[in-house]
Image (cartoon, coloured by chain):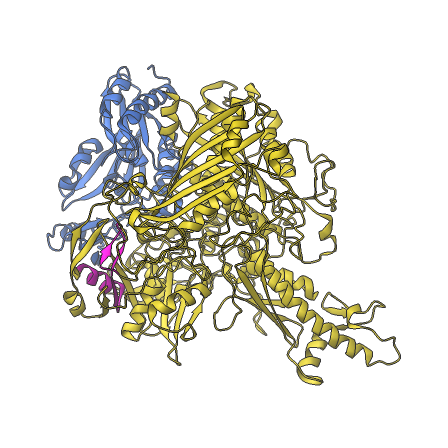
Amino acid sequence: MIVNLNINDFGKELDISPGESLLSVLRREGYFGTKHGCEKGECGSCTVLLDGRPVNSCLLLAAQAEGSRVQTIEAVGQHPEQGWKLTEGLHSLQQAFVETGAIQCGYCTPAQILAAKALLERNPDPGEDEVREALSGVLCRCTGYLKPVQAVLRAAARMRGEAANDVGRRIFPEPQGISGDRGKGVGDTESPDFFAPIPSSTDTKVQVLPKMIVTSERETLSRVGKPDPKVDAVKLVQGKPAFTADFERRGMLIAKVLHSPVAHARIKHIDVSNALSLPGVAAVLTWKDIPRVVYSTAGQSDPIPGPLDTFSLDNKVRYVGDRVAFVAAETEEIAKKALELIEVEYEPLPELLDPDDAMKPGAPVLHDEPEFVNFADSDPGRNLAAEIRIDIGDIEQGYEEADHIFEDEFSVSKVQPAHIEPHVVVTYWNEDDRLVIRTSTQVPFHVRRQLAPVLGLPIKRIRVIKPRIGGGFGGKQEILNEDVAAHLTIATGRSVIHEYTREEEFIDARSRHPMRIRMKTGVKSDGTITANAMYVLTDTGAYGCHALTVTGNTGHKAMALYVGDGPYRKAPNIRFYADIVYTNHPPAGAYRGYGVPQGFWAVERHIEKIARHLDLDPLEFRLKNALRAGELHPFSTAWSEGREPRPEIIETCGLEACVQQGKAVIGWDQKYAVPEWHDVFNVKGECAPYLRKGIGVALVMQGTAIPYLDMGGASIKMNEDGSFNLLVGATDLGTGSDTVLAQMAAEVLGVPLEDVLVYSSDTDFTPFDKGAYASSTTYVSGAAVVLAAEKVAERIRDRASRMLNEDTEQQRVQPSEIRLVERRAITPDGRSVNLSDVGHNALHHEDQEQIMGVGSYMSPVAPPPFAAQFAEVTVDIETGQVVVDRLVMAVDSGVIVNPITASGQVEGGMAQALGYAVSEEMCYDERGRAREVDLWDYHIFRANEMPELETIFVETFEPSHPFGVKAVAEIPMDGVAPAVGNAVLDACGVHINDNPITPEKIWMKLNT
Amino acid sequence: MIIEYHRPQTINEALILLSRDQPATVPLGGGTVLNQPSREAYAVVDLQSLGLDEINKHGQLLQIGATCKLQSLLELDGKSDVVLPQALCDAIRLEGTINIRQLATVAGGLVSADGRSPFGTAMLALNPTLTLLPGEEEISYGELLPLRDLKLRHRLITQIHLPLNTKLSYHYVSRSPFDLPLVSAAVAIWSSGRTRVVLGGYGEMPALAFDGPESSGAEIAAQNVFQNAGDQWASAQYRREMAVVLTKRAIADMGGRV
């Protein structure tokens, strides 16, 4: 049917199908700022303005929009520099989003900006609640919404003609007497009473920057530590076609996957003839059509530290959602129809859905295929994907030395990364008949290496391009659907796009590993931990991707924090045993935190109970036993991701300072063990008898990269205008890593950030990088960037000295005497040459050369970040409903390269972890069918229901990195759930051992 | 799957289209339900040109056009002489995000309400009357809801008549403030003392638990209605107990005795 649409004030006559959504038509017409995130209006990333009002274009038929004015992000603002043409520049909202760091992956940013624009056009002076309401239609999985709200308030002020405040300076000196091993504090002294408790407030802070306690070592740094805007922010606020699915190619086929409706069965018979005969179908592939190559979908370095147990297509299905066939067709509609025409006869096999049953005699065996490749102690005959047995010290001796033994059991549920951009990939043969895979991945180099044998191609005939990623959180550390499109491109010779629906994300993508955890801890009456043991039973689902390493990290981090006091510091008694078993659930995999949140749920709930049982102050008890700087990481001699472990000393630990700062900000001393604070009063001052407030804490640690294994590379070349191209294999999945890497290069090269042009990543052009996982990019890839930049800087100094020494009347200068500052090479006596002249000289004038440098870095250590997570809750003791009121996290992540992006990581991480604490879980019925298949049932927090979030950075200077950094990305996932659990305990005396903490669980405990 | 799209200019045209059996033809309000993926093939009749989106107040009765958007209803509150019960505004906000509310219509929200619908639960307590065409049939929401598939076949809702002389309270339990409810209770009390209790959070539609001349006995009725209301989201025991707690609170909100 023909419709006339008014899109951004241009009339367009379009031929559409009656049921076609406005989203589909807009994207087909090139309005790529309108994003696909779901099909039911849950996420709002497809928001457009319809007659000035925000609507979900996925839920609106294109035909419905006829007669209305449709506005997309493409009509909002322009890049301020477009050569000789004057432009209006960015819209105030876009500018504010850039300045405040409101953009992380940027996938939902156009939608947020349009929603905010609609608000401000109706209400130029909104309050915070109104802003949150306006943004509530757009899910953001990255930011925690704080900075987007601040951006809108800031833009509103600016649009009203009010001066926009500075993004804020909240840098504080190091307080006296708490530093331990940390460096002397420097910086502004804006808040001498920093330790004074700051009252809780529901208002979003005007200042965007987090509170920071800085180290002295960063005093000389000019770019590192600055809140520079993200290097990709301007394109993302404009909704530029930067993501995988925004790629246009003539004649691209649409791929779809037929998923298994049963949890465990053999494919007895499959007939695709009807599907193949459907006009518009280009290919249908089943297990009969492609080579049978066993592999692992886990994107990890070689050799894969886990079993090889997966085929692109198999004659057996192992979970509801497992793959049965691939289809490529001219349109999505035809592809879907073709799926319905595939006839499959399943021979049912017994289902294995309870991990407790997995290793029992007679249990159904999931992996009986002869191609199965073991890793370490995996044993498919017992459904054992991996086994871990770690003993540090003598656990039994430790128990004997204890006055009290505490035992308890905990469980954590299966949860989804739920990145708003689904998994999406485009494949095609290029003009050299090399296979190009353009994919939303965290691990482009692993995709190339691991897919090569699966596709029957040598590595060199595959090129993987990673464009912008709309969030990943570990979910894209998986080679999940690249093979689907690639097989179909090989079969058809044509370009293919495959994009998951939201339902497919739930039934067929990866999740956090659910675990059942048993703790047994020996403690002396004075609070000294003498022995600590954890046993974990992990449900890896149908395949063993990340099975060993995720659960290994559960122990490696969570069980490393509390070593005990006194002699136990040097000789702790720790046991960590784990069995990781197959079941007929969808496979688990990598998810931000990588096993550590599961571990800390058990450890921190258990520690809290012990403290309360022994009547010990929970924070003093924790700090008494916690790991300190100068001590051996207890697991470093016992386990290293399935490889040879090597001893590692903790060089920096700001945990005690984090506790002090966090306590001050949340007002711990005024609340904990203060009975009257726990009462809740209404506006009339009447006590609400069924509401109780509680406060809780959890201390956590993570790691930074994988030592002796994962490597990052970088190359930098200089241009004649003094700018630099920085090429990295590292993948910025919204975290801001491109920006912080550029800041590090800019620091070494003495230029502003805008002079460093970052490109990541393309396996043909950028150096190798292991990818974005294990909290490694800032640390490992950053060190590689610094090494590359130092090589470039050396060449610049050399050439600059020659240029300056041409003036023979002046004193000769040595290259080593030259400093690179503010785009100039400067001698000690103040002479200088600007970098543009150096660039021209090198490329055009004399002794011509390309100034460039390549660096790579592999770390021998994995310095842990530490944090103190605090939570305040209100519990309704009649219903069990818990409302999380406030989250405060004080983090030691070493030196903070960019406080805006780093605090965005913490805020977003806390928001994700909040869902994990109270609302997110994936449940299955007795036949293995998913309860949650959309973002209505799988509830992610929205902007209008968030608690107050506060981030504090307590810097240390990690000596193993040139700029003293440690990781920040994953640790925010670790402490929220146990802190909330402990706060619930504080509020109403109820122990919830199984997360999430739901109303019924609390109510049941209160009533038993 | 939508195979035909029609946008009639008159109600008559719409009714003619809706009278067809082949293809199955249904009215399209905002589309927030019908435009979701579906395997069934059907034609839609877009009602946006029929002028059914007006809201008028007549005494203590609010006449709401069937295609009035939920957000329009929300924005009406306080911006005219219409004062909606605060609990109804809350339920509308809980029904869907602001983006959804810009599209979703009042009639669409009523006919598609499942047990977890806050708007459906609150409205069933208020029990508005709906006008159906053809036939100008007036039917209460309470009568329509269990028979909606049958009653709405080939027909069109044109108006909703909402009583404004009623107090309403809505309470719920959920995993987060804007999550779908695990249990909810809406209580409407008329000046005469008539009390209507509706429970939500469970089942294919909100459940009327009590409709009496006064509130006494309401909480027992609520408990009885959720006697076996267990599913994968909450146990029957929990829902049963919460039905009592929430009903008591809702009645107490309005100064009623429990």
Q: Residue furthest right?
A: A809
- Which residues are the magenta region? A314-340
Residue B180 in sight: yes
Which quadrant of the rendered structure holds the C terminus of chain A?
A: top left
- Residue at image location 38% in from the left, 66% down from the top: A451
* Residue A273: x %, y % from top left: 15, 67
* Residue A622: x %, y % from top left: 58, 32
Using residue A3 as the reference point, say whether residue A448 is left or right of it: right
Residue B42 lies in magenta, yes or no? no
Using residue A257 as the reference point, say whether residue A795 is left or right of it: right
Q: Is residue B82 above or below residue A856?
A: above
What colour has chain A?
A: yellow
Comparing B213 with A836, the one in front is A836
What colour has chain B?
A: blue
Comparing A419 with A930, the one in front is A930
Residue A591 in sight: no
* Residue A625: x %, y % from top left: 59, 33
How many numbered circles does the render carry?
0
Comparing A579 with A434, the one in front is A579
Residue A221 picture quarter: bottom right
Q: Is residue A487 above or below residue B70?
A: below
Using residue A297 as the reference point, say whether residue A398 is left or right of it: right
* Residue A91: x %, y % from top left: 54, 58
Which quadrant of the rendered structure holds the N terminus of chain A?
A: bottom left
Comparing A260 with A382, the one in front is A382
